[in-house]
Image (cartoon, grey):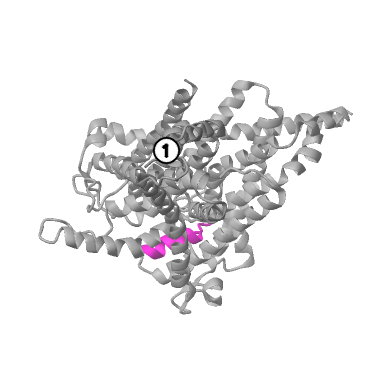
Amino acid sequence: MNSITKKKVRVSDAFVYGLIYLCAGISVLLIVGIIIYVFVKGFSQINWEFLTTTTSILKGTVGIAGNILNTVYIVVLTMLLVTPIGVGAAIYLNEYAKPVRLVRIIELATETLSGIPSIIFGMFGMMFFGTTLGLKYSILTGTLTLTLMVLPLITRNTQEALKTVPDSYRHGAVALGAGKWYTIRTILLPSAMPGIITGVILAVGRIVGESAALLYTAGSSDLLPATAKAYLGKILQPGGTLTIKLYLSAQDGEFDVAFGIALVLLVIVLVINMGTKFIAKKFDVNRLN
Amino acid sequence: MGKKYASEKIAKAIFILFAIIAIVAVCSITVYMIKLGTPALSQVGVVELLFGTEWKPTAAEPTFGIFCVILTSIFGTMMALLIGVPIGVLTAVFLAEVGNKKIVMIVQPAVELLAAVPSVIYGLLGIMLLKPFMYNLELMVYNDISEHQFTGGANFLSAILVLAIMILPTVINISTSSIRAVQPSIKSASLALGATKIQTIFKVVLPAAKSGIMTAVVLGMGRALGEAMAIAMVAGGAVNFPLPFNSVRFLTTLIVGEMSYSSGLHREALFTIGLVLFAFILFVNIFLTRMIRKGDAE
């Protein structure tokens, strides 16, 4: 009997609810499963030697110090290059741009760039930076390739951050006689800083996890430079990041090493995720993934 | 005063320069991909290369047909979407409409983390967990069929599952925000007319969020088409017609797998594969996104 006082439970509704909960559960199960599995498999591998030496048959050591160094090199150099460019581009788009046409084209280009798969960046980087510019397989080739790849991420996050700065700040600055560049430097950039930092952290995460764009640009060397001078010259030498080493180890059947690296990568990813959370919470910023 | 003016001008010039880099990058990538990809097309022949089914680049009489590879990428992407999109959209419904706040606070970060896991880790887990499972399945299915070439579990099906998982975060995130953007008033109207919550979600909310969900599907499609390393580790190493238990090469995994030892025409053919992939991606990202926006405006 139908009644407005009695709540009728529809069987089909209950079924769909079950399905929805099931699907939501899949994501949670997947990530929890991945984290636990990688920690269990990789934990025994992690020790001081693994993190501070390179793999050497002579010395009988198994280590990823060379790959850690390469990863740090590529992350730092790429961020040094891409942050000013991305932030500058966002400032132009948001604060200066008058010609509507140009803005539309730049935004379309940024959008297109963000949709290009990393393997294409890898091929382009290999042939343009590596062959045409003669940089060969090197950390610099990888850096330049990744700069193009993460540029949209920085630009869009900065743009979002600049959009949240109230117009009254800009009007106030103009009314006080400040020039545009002066306003940007002293008011807009500091106000947008949390958003920019979030973009930077997300870009670091993207670079740390990147592999396809690096395999044929930065190469796969996993040695540490021998002398202090060689540390500088390393930029022009090939160097495989942690992800590349993981891939090659898995190909060679060295699953212990692969899981050790997977654990290191996962810890970095977790820290980065918490970092962006912390900033978002502290400064209440909107961000784009 | 003059100095100040100069710094303003310089700043503006630098910002324009930085903004234009994105255009320069897209243009040079396009030009390079075309320049690199066309020599093999003219040498092998457009039809033979794109629609040939034999890929034997290192044979004495090499053949460069990538039709199976193209089909693998297209079918693989479609199948991954077929699995990933329903799960993704239902998860989005949970996050935006059904779930109570406490559980949403668990599911949302889980999805974010899933997006951040590097693709080589998905590949590694695929090797360790999926491959043995698939191998057992393969043994069961092909028990009596002697002409089947056993793959050890590195097959099309493994790759589809990995892709389906990898597109989940993209589909979930964009669907969730588009469902959340649906006006509450139409929801209330539906509920007030006596529709149940589930009826409201599926007959009112999801249709209203249609264009956002379509965008999610398109972006997931782009992600699946372009994924390389994870599936390179689980899809196998031979070019075959994309059947579930065949070892297959995707457009991306063929490049990853063979670039290091290729030379001459073989290498040029790999660049053509890159060009085909690039064309697919541009079609998906620009054309399909446009179509959705146009449909939205009507």
Mark 1 residue type: Gln
Q: Confirm whether the magenta stretch covers residue A242.
A: yes
Q: Name which quarter of the figure residue A30 lies in.
A: bottom left
**Residue identifier under label 1:** B199
Magenta stretch, main secondary structure class: helix
- Given residues B176 and B182, the one toward you in this image is B182
**Count of numbered marks:** 1
The magenta stretch is A237-251
Residue in view at x 48 percent, y 55 percent: B118
Q: Is residue A288 above or below residue A257?
A: above
Q: Position of residue B5 (x, y in %)?
A: 83, 28
Give left or right: position of A269 versus B50.
right
Q: Name which quarter of the figure residue B241 lies in.
A: top left
Q: Position of residue A221 (x, y in %)?
A: 48, 61
What is the secondary structure assignment of the residue under circle 1?
helix
Number of residues whose C-alpha sits closer than 10 Å to that of mark 1, classed few (under 14), some (14–19) or many (20 or more): some
Q: Position of residue B281 (x, y in %)?
A: 41, 36
- Given residues A199 and B233, the one toward you in this image is A199
Residue in view at x 62 percent, y 21 percent: A100
Image mark 1: chain? B
Q: Position of residue A163 (x, y in %)?
A: 68, 35
Q: Is residue A53 above or below residue A88?
A: below
Residue in view at x 46 percent, y 67 percent: A36
Give left or right: position of A192 versus A4.
right
Q: Confirm whether the magenta stretch covers residue A54.
A: no
